[in-house]
Amino acid sequence: MDFTFSDDQLSFRDALHAMLVGEVTTDRIRSRWDTDSGTDEALLQQIQAFGFGSMLVPESLDGLGLDLVDFVLLAEACGRAALPEPVVESAMVVTPLLVDVLDRGLGNGFVQEVLDGLIAGTTSVAVAHPINPCVNFAHRADWLLLEHGDELHLIHRDSTTLKSHKSVDPSRRLASVTFDPSSDTQIANGEAGAKLWRATLNRGALASAAQLLGLTQGIIDQCIQYSTDRHQFGRAIGVNQAVKHLMADVAVQLEYVKPVVYRAAYTAAVSPDRADFAVSHAKIAAARAAMLAARNSIQLHGAMGYTWECDLQIWVKRCWALAREWGDDGFHKNRMHEWLLRPNALLGPEFTFGRRSITDSVDVA
Amino acid sequence: MDLNYTEAQHAFRAEIREWLAVNVPRTPLASFDTKEGFAAHREWERTLAKGNWGMVTWPEVYGGRGCDLIEWLIFEEEYYRAGAPLRVNQNGIFLLGPTLMEYGTEEQKARFIPAMASGDEIWAQGWSEPNAGSDMAAIRCRADRDGDEFVINGQKIWSTRAVYADWVFGLFRTDPASERHRGLSKILVPLNAAGITVRPIAQLNGLPGFAEIFFDDVRVPAFNMLGGEGEGWNIAMATAGFERGLMLRSPARFQQAARRLVDLYRDRGNDILDPSIEDAVLRCYMDAEAYALSTYQTASKLTRGGSIGPEASCNKIFWSEMDILIHETAMKLLGARAEIEPETATEITELGSWLDGFMFAQSGPIYAGTNEIQRNIIAERMLGMPRK
Ligand SMILES: Cc1cc2nc3c(=O)[nH]c(=O)nc-3n(C[C@H](O)[C@H](O)[C@H](O)COP(=O)(O)OP(=O)(O)OC[C@H]3O[C@@H](n4cnc5c(N)ncnc54)[C@H](O)[C@@H]3O)c2cc1C
C-alpha cells in the first residue's frame, strides 16, 4: 500500500508546470481569443515534445506505455495553467479510445494510421460523446470519433457538418456535429461499442476532474496574490478573516478532492470496468471545489472580479464549463447513488480499497 | 502508487479481526462519562493491552507491535467495523504517547508508557483555562520551581475525562515573568495529588464529560516535566499537530457512521423525506471516503519519510463538519422521533445512538482548536495570506 506518486512522476509534473507558467501567459491566452483556430501552434509543438501524443499508448503500439496515474498530475498542471488547447482530452480520452479499439482487434484500416498521426503529433482527433452536447475544438480536428447508438464511428471532419456554438469561456471552441453513419465509418458496435463509450465517459470525467483540481489551485494562487496586493483601510484586504476564510474553505475542499481524483485515476488504470463509482466521486467532488473557488474568488476580487479585464475569468469560466462536461452533478450523483444503494455494495471502513484489492472493489453488475 | 495491501497487511487484518470477534463485548458498554462506564472502559483497555492491541504503532517493549501507520489504519478499520468500545485513554495513547516517544527521556518513557498502555493510568489534557481558550498563549496557571519540585497553582478547564482520570498533562507557566508563548512548560500531574480539586462539568448530554481542575500548592517532582523548561509551547504544538493531523479521529470512525447512515436511509420505509436528504447521504458517504483516502495518502507520505505540514489544519475542519452533516442527516431521517432519548430496548434499536452522536458532533468544530482558528492557520500558514 503506497498512496504516493514517485519522484519521477512529480518531477515530470513540475517540469511541465514550469514550461506552462512561462508559455501560457494570460496575454497569450487572450490573443488566442481573437484567432479563428483558438490555438497556439508553437505551444502545441512544445506539449508534443513532452510526449503527450504517445504517453498513454502501450509500448507494443510504439507508445511510452504510461498510465492514467502517470498522466493525472500532468492533466492537473494543464488545468492550473488554464491551458486552452484540448491536449488533456486528446491524450487522456481520445488516444486510449483508439488504443482500446485496436486492442480488441476492432476498427478499420484507418485506426492505426490515425493513432500513428496522434503519436507523431501530426493528426488531431476529437471525440463526441453523447453526454456532451458539443465537441470542443472539433473544427481543428482532422478526425472525429462519433456515436450512433452503441456504434463508434471514425470520420474525417470534412465528411461531417459542424455548427459552432459560443462558449461562456472564450478559450473554448464548441461545435455540435452531425454526420451520416455508414458501415465504412463504423469501427465498433454492439456490446463492444457500448463498453468503449462507457470507458470513454470515465476517462473524460477523470480528465475534467483532474483539470478542475488544477484550475482550483490556479484560482487560489491568484487570490492569494490579489489579497496581498490590494489595500483597503490602509492594509492588505487579505488580513481580514472574512477574506481569509473565503480561501481557507476552498483549500480545505481541494485538499480532500486530490486523493479522490488520484484514486479514480488508479482505479480507471488498473480496473477500468469497475471505475464508475470512483470516477463519479472524483467528478462530483472536483466540480464542487472548483465551483466554490470560482464563486469565492470573484467575491475576493470585489468589482474587479466582475470585469472582462480581470484575468480571473480565464480560470473561473473554465471551471463553469468543465464542472458540467463529461457528466454533470445530476448524472454522476445518480450513478453514485445507484451504486451506494446496491444490496451488495461494499460500504464501511474495511472496504476503502475493495474487498481484497481495488480490482474487486465493486461487484460487476 | 500501489493501492493494494501486501499479504502481510492482509494477514494483519485477519488477525485483528479474529481477535476482536472473540473479545469485543457483546453489549455496548455504558458511557465512559459515568463511573461504571469508565471502569468498564478501563477494563476494556486492559483486555486490549493483554492482546498487545493497545497501541499497535508503539514498539514492542512498550506493549505495542511496532506497526507502521498503514497497519494502524487497518487496525482502526477493523476496530470500528467490530463496533468495539471508544478509547477512554485516547488523550494518553493518541496524544501524550507520541509526544513522550519524541520528547521523553528513557526514564520518563519507562515510567509512563507501560501504565498508559495497560489502562492503569488514564489521562486527561489540561490546556484550556477560563481566560485561555482559543488564545492558549494566555495561560496563567503557574508551576514554580522549588528545588526538585514544581509547585502548581491555578486552574484548568474543559479537561475531557478528568472526572475519573488518573493523570493530567498540560501547559503551565514555569517562568512567572514570561509572557505569551515563552516560559511555558509541559508537566504531567497525578490527579490524586494533594491540593487538587476536580469539579465535574456536565456537557450538553448531562454527563460530566469534562471538568475544571483547581491546583492549590500542588507539588510534583521536576521529573514530571516533559522536554525542557520553557519548551512547552513547541511541544504542545507537536501534540496539537498530531491531534488535528492524524490520530485523533481516524477515518474508520466516520466511514462506519456513514455506513450506518446509508443503512438508516435504506430502511426509511415509506417516510416522506426532505428532498435534500438523498444528496446529504451521498455527500456523507463520499466525504468519509475522501477522508480515508486522504489519511492513507498522509500515512504513505509519513511512511516514506515525509512530514505533516500546515495542511493538517484542513483535516480538523473536514472531519468535524462531516461529522455534523452525518448526524444532522440522521436526525432528519428520524424526523420527529429524533428528539427521543432512547431508553427502552425497542427505542435503542430504532433510534440507535444518533442523538448522542448529534450532540457530540456539535463540539467537533470547537475542541482541538476551533474551526475559525483553523481557517486562520490555513490562510496564513498554508496559503500564505497576509497577517498584518
Ligand atoms: C467537548 C470538548 C472537549 C474539550 N476537551 C478539552 C481538553 O481535554 N483539554 C483542554 O484543555 N481543553 C478542552 N476543550 C476546550 C477547547 O480546547 C476550547 O473550547 C477551545 O480551544 C476554544 O476555546 P473557548 O471555548 O474558550 O472559546 P473562545 O476562545 O472563547 O471562542 C469563542 C468563539 O470565538 C471564536 N474566536 C475566538 N478567537 C478568535 C479569533 N482570533 N478569530 C476568529 N474567531 C475567534 C471561536 O472560534 C469561537 O467560535 C474541550 C472543548 C470541548 C467542547
Image (cartoon, coloured by chain):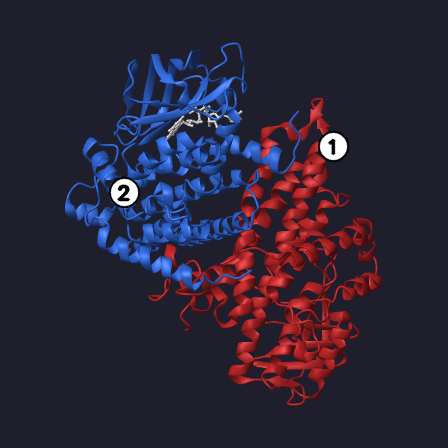
Chain colours: A red, B blue
The answer to whether the residue bearing label 1 lies less than 8 angstroms from the nearest atom of ligand 1 is no
Question: In the displayed structure, does residue A331 sit left or right of residue A15?
Answer: left
Instruction: Name the quadrant of the N terminus of chain B.
Output: bottom right
In front of the other: A202 or A73: A73
Residue A135 visible somewhere in the drawing = no
The spot of residue B330 in percent (x, y) is: 33, 47
Instruction: Name the quadrant of the C terminus of chain B.
Output: top right
Residue beneath the point at 42% across and 73% down: A364
Residue A55, image quadrant: bottom right
Question: In the displayed structure, does residue A124 sit left or right of residue A56?
Answer: right
In front of the other: B359 or A312: B359
Which three-letter amino acid code belongs to the residue tagged 1?
Asp
Q: Is residue B63 above or below residue B4?
A: above
Query: Circle 1 sits in a helix, a strand or a loop, which is it?
Result: helix
Q: Is residue B194 above or below residue A37?
A: above
Mark 2 Cα shell of 10 Å, populated few (<14), some (14-19), many (≥20): some
Same-subunit check for callouts 1 and 2: no
- Chain ID of residue with mark 2: B
In front of the other: A35 or A244: A244
C-alpha separation, residue under disc 1 versus residue under disc 2: 50 Å
Q: Which residue is mark 1?
A: A229
Task: Find ligand 1 in the image and state its quadrant.
Answer: top left
Q: Which residue is mark 2?
A: B338
Residue B172, image quadrant: top left
Residue beneath the point at 25% across and 30% down: B207
The spot of residue A103 in percent (x, y) is: 60, 82
Q: Is residue A357 above or below residue B189?
A: below
Mark 1 Cα shell of 10 Å, populated few (<14), some (14-19), many (≥20): few
